[in-house]
Amino acid sequence: GDVSFSPDGTRLAVAWWDGHVDLWDVPGRRFLRALTDREQPQRGRLAFSPVRNLLAATSESKVVTLYDFDSGRESVLWRAPDQGGWSVRDLAFSQDGSRVVIYAGSASFWLNVKTTPELGDAVWVVNVSSSKIESRHPTVWSDTRFHGAARLSPDNRRLYLARSDGLNYRYSIQCLDLATGQELWQTERQRDRGLTTLAISPDGRVLASGSGFEDPTIRVWETATGRFLVRLDGHTGWVHKLVFTKDGRRLIS
C-alpha cells in the first residue's frame, strides 16, 4: 500500500494492498472516512500535494481521483487507456504542486509484447489545475505490478523515470528533457527485476532509488549527470518507498 501526510501534518491518507483508501485525523488519532471502500485488483497508491490540502489517489481500477479537502470537491485526474488491465505503480506531485506524475503499466501486456507497444509501461505528466495530460513517456515493460517510479525536477523541466526491463532482469534510470522529450542521460543497467521507488532531494541535486527482490540496496545519483554517488546498505528485503526530509539532510526508507 501507501501512506502520505497533508502539508500541515493534520491528515494522514492510507492506501491498502486491496485498493481501499482511508483518511485519518492525526492530532485526534481518529478515523475520518473511507475515500475508496471497495476492493480493487491492484494495491492503492496516493500522494498529498506538498503545498495544498489536495490528495491524488487511486479510486478504482484505472482511475486516479483528485480530492480537494478545502472545497470538498472530487474530480477524475487521470483515467487509463481502455485497453489492457492497467495498474498504477507510482504517483507523485511535483514540488510546486502543479503537476502529478503517474507511472502505470498494463498487466495484460505480456500476452502480446511485440505487437501492442501502446500497452507497455508508461509515465504520464498531468496538469493539476486542468486535469490535462501534458505528456506521455513509454518505458520498458516490467513483468510485475510492483515496479516503476517517476519524479519531476523542482523546476519541472526534467523527468526521471524507471526503465524496468523485466524480460532481461535489468533496470536503469532515465532522465528526459520535458521540453524536447530528448534523453539527457541514462544510468548503467542494474541487475534486478525492476526499480521500486525514487525520491529527489528538495534542492534537486541528488536522486535516490530503491529496488527489490535480489538487490535491496539504495543508490544515490547526481541528477545533473546521472553519475552514481553512493550505495546505502542495510535492508534485507525490497525497498518500498524513499522520502527526503524537507531540509534534504536525511533520507527515510
Image (spheres, rainbow, N blue to C red):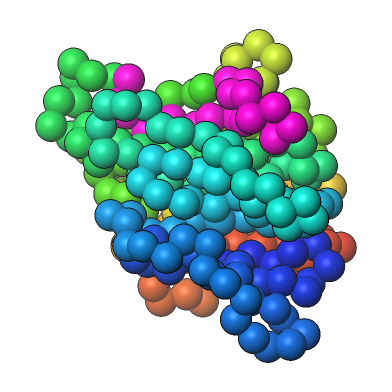
Judging depth in this view, the residue of 203 and 117 nearest the camera is 117
- Residue 63 in sight in this render: yes
Task: Kindly identify the residue that appears in the image at 74 percent across and 32 percent down.
Answer: 129
- Give residue 214's quadrant in the image: bottom left
Taking the view exactly as shown, the residue that stands out farthest to the top is 180
Q: In which quarter of the image is the C terminus?
A: bottom right
Quadrant of the drawing holding the N terminus: bottom left
The residue under the point 51% across, 44% down is: 64
Image position, residue 73 (x, y; %)? 68, 48
Q: Nearer the viewer, residue 184 or 177?
A: 177
Q: Is residue 131 magenta?
A: yes
Left or right relative to 13: residue 16: left
Magenta includes 151? no
In the picture provided, is 203 more to the left or to the right than 137?
right
Expressed as whole percent of the image width and height from the top left, the position of residue 248 reads 81, 60
Can residue 212 be seen in the rendering of this structure?
A: no
**Residue that appears at 75% across and 26% down:** 157
Magenta residues, start to end: 118-135
Residue at the image position 39 percent from the left and 73 percent from the top: 237
Q: Can you tell which quarter of the image residue 184 is in?
A: top right
Q: In which quarter of the image is residue 47?
A: bottom right
Task: Name, please, the residue furthest toward the left.
Answer: 111
